[in-house]
Image (cartoon, coloured by chain):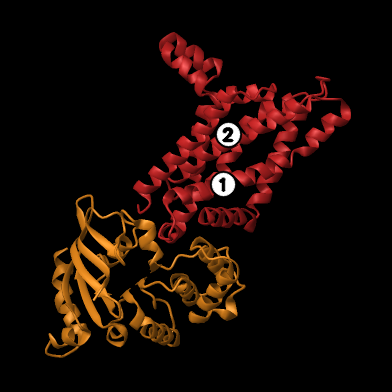
């Protein structure tokens, strides 16, 4: 199968500190990868390198066959990225912000309007479309970030903590949305919520101290501990690394 | 191109989303008015030209243009939106040019609002309007130079105050490099640098315009100056975007 995401030996050092250490994997259409790991394990840095925002110290990353460093603009065209903390320009209205994204992505006229309307509907933002982003609650802001990532219906989605700050109903909706989109896309989500991985991911990867320490289906991973609970596996795999650091 | 214009338009609208734009325009016009009429002796000179107006303009730019550019990158960095902007399918050069164009358009509007000076001088006498037009063209060009400089300074930091102070300092260096104090000091100690300093000065170039002369070498110098700092801005961004 054609891999939509290919990462090979991706490494990032900040001075003497190695944030990401030789991470390699491929992701095909239809797969949803859950990125797990303690804070500071290198999840966000890996995602930033995939989006071409952080330059890797070594290694390479491809999105839909485009190198994220040497063919950055083409790679980003096929990527929907929700950055850490879901940053959005605070003074813009929700619809104004999405219109800006649509324009930068090359849509205009009626097509731009359709894309914005679709994204608003997908993220259930219709009721707040004319409000400035700065007046919205954390959950709404996160969904504006999500709408922005989905606007161009990209084959690859990289979402850094898409459900952080959402209430249980909103979490449910976003998970359902991800599951609906999954067959046509390759999706990476990072999360601290382990049941989310079991709910939406076809594959789970645990990262600790910049290295991949586990990569399996959530079910397989959970069976690695006698209790059969993902939480126990997570603790067993990441605690020694956290203590050593 | 379309993406560059989309970025420029968002940035331009951003100026007017807060009172900053209006505060800036009012202060700019008040300062130019005071300097032209009181300090410049516009009426006492009894001459139908805008030389007192143009004489102070570069120095007002040194002080105020960095206030336009300080937010361009520092604010993106502080909000984290820089990560969003630079992961859209645009090159860093496009983002730099888009923001620069927005700041330039805003400055041109502020400059256009000085039209009452032109009307006043035309009512009171018969000035050489070609000379005034040349002065305005020069003003637009050196404004672009100070903007490019200020934008590059803004890319260095996430603190707008630092971006502003750095922008003023850099602008002052390129404005004042032809001052007698500077060139005398240099010609006594480092004669080679004295010539270079005089050539680098934006104010000297601008004065040629205000005398009604649009020389190709001045236009080329000012445009190259802008391009140089826009490239510097892109390089700074490439190296420091994720810091």
Q: Is residue A230 above or below residue A119?
A: below
Q: Quadrant of residue A207?
A: bottom left
SS type, badge 2: helix
* Colour red maps to chain: B
In the shown orientation, is residue A197 left or right of residue B216?
left
| Residue at horizontal 14 percent and vertical 88 percent from the top | A223
* Colour orange maps to chain: A
User: From where the camera sits, is residue A94 visible?
Assistant: no
| Residue at horizontal 64 percent and vertical 23 percent from the top | B207
Residue density around tag 1, few if under 14, some if 14–19, many if 20 or more, within 10 Å: many
The circle drawn on residue B62 is: 2
Q: How far apart are marks 1 and 2 (CA)?
A: 18 Å
**Which percent across, then down, holds residue B43?**
83, 24
Closer-to-camera residue (A236/B147): B147
Q: Do labels 1 and 2 share a chain?
A: yes
Q: Do the residues labelled 1 and 2 touch (CB within 8 Å)?
A: no
The circle drawn on residue B101 is: 1
What is the chain letter for disc 1?
Answer: B
Q: In this view, does A48 lie above or below B215?
A: below
**Which percent across, then down, holds residue B2?**
54, 56
**Which percent across, then down, holds residue B101?**
56, 46
- Nearer the viewer's eye, disc 1 or disc 2? 1
- N-term-proximal mark, 1 vs 2: 2
Closer-to-camera residue (A106/B37): A106
User: From where the camera sits, is residue A69 visible?
Assistant: yes
Q: Quadrant of residue A136?
A: bottom right
């Amino acid at each position: 199968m054609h891999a939509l995401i290919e990462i090979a030996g991706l490494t990032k050092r900040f001075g003497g500190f190695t944030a990401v250490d030789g991470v390699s994997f491929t992701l095909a259409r239809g797969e949803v990868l859950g990125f797990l790991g303690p804070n500071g394990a290198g999840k966000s840095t890996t995602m930033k390198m995939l989006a071409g925002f952080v330059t890797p110290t070594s290694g390479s990353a491809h999105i839909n066959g485009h190198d994220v460093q040497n063919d950055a603009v083409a790679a980003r065209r096929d990527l929907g990225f929700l950055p850490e903390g879901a940053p959005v320009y605070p003074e813009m209205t929700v619809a104004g912000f999405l219109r800006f994204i649509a324009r930068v992505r090359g849509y205009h006229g009626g097509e731009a309007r359709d894309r914005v309307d679709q994204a608003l509907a997908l993220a259930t933002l219709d009721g707040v479309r004319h409000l400035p982003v700065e007046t919205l609650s954390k959950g709404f802001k996160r969904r504006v970030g999500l709408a922005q990532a989905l606007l161009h219906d990209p084959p690859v989605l990289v979402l850094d903590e898409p459900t952080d700050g959402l209430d249980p109903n909103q979490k449910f909706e976003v998970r359902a949305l991800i599951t609906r989109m999954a067959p046509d896309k390759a999706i990476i989500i990072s999360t601290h919520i382990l049941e989310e991985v079991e709910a939406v991911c076809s594959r789970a990867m645990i990262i600790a101290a910049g290295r991949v320490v586990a990569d399996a289906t959530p079910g397989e991973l959970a069976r690695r501990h006698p209790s059969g609970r993902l939480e126990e596996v997570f603790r067993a795999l990441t605690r020694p690394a956290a203590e050593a650091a | 191109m379309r993406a560059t214009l989309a970025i420029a338009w968002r940035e331009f609208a951003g100026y007017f989303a807060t009172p900053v734009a209006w505060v800036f325009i009012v202060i700019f016009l008040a300062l130019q008015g005071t300097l032209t009429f009181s300090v410049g002796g516009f009426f006492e000179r009894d001459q139908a030209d805008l030389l007192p107006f143009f004489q102070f303009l570069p120095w007002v730019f040194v002080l105020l243009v960095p206030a336009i550019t300080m937010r361009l990158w520092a604010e993106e960095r502080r909000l984290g939106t820089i990560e969003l902007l630079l992961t859209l399918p645009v090159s860093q050069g496009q983002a730099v040019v888009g923001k620069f164009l927005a700041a330039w358009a805003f400055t041109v509007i502020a400059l256009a609002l000085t039209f009452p000076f032109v009307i006043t001088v035309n009512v009171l006498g018969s000035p050489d309007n070609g000379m005034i037009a040349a002065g305005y063209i020069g003003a637009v060009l050196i404004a672009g130079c100070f903007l490019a400089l200020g934008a590059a300074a803004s890319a260095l930091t996430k603190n707008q105050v630092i971006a502003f102070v750095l922008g003023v300092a850099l602008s002052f260096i390129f404005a004042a490099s032809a001052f007698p104090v500077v060139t005398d000091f240099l010609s006594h100690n480092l004669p080679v640098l004295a010539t270079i300093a005089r050539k680098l000065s934006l104010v000297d170039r601008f004065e040629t315009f205000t005398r009604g002369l649009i020389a190709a070498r001045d236009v080329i110098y000012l445009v190259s100056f802008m391009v140089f700092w826009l490239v510097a801005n892109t390089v700074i961004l490439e190296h420091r975007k994720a810091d």
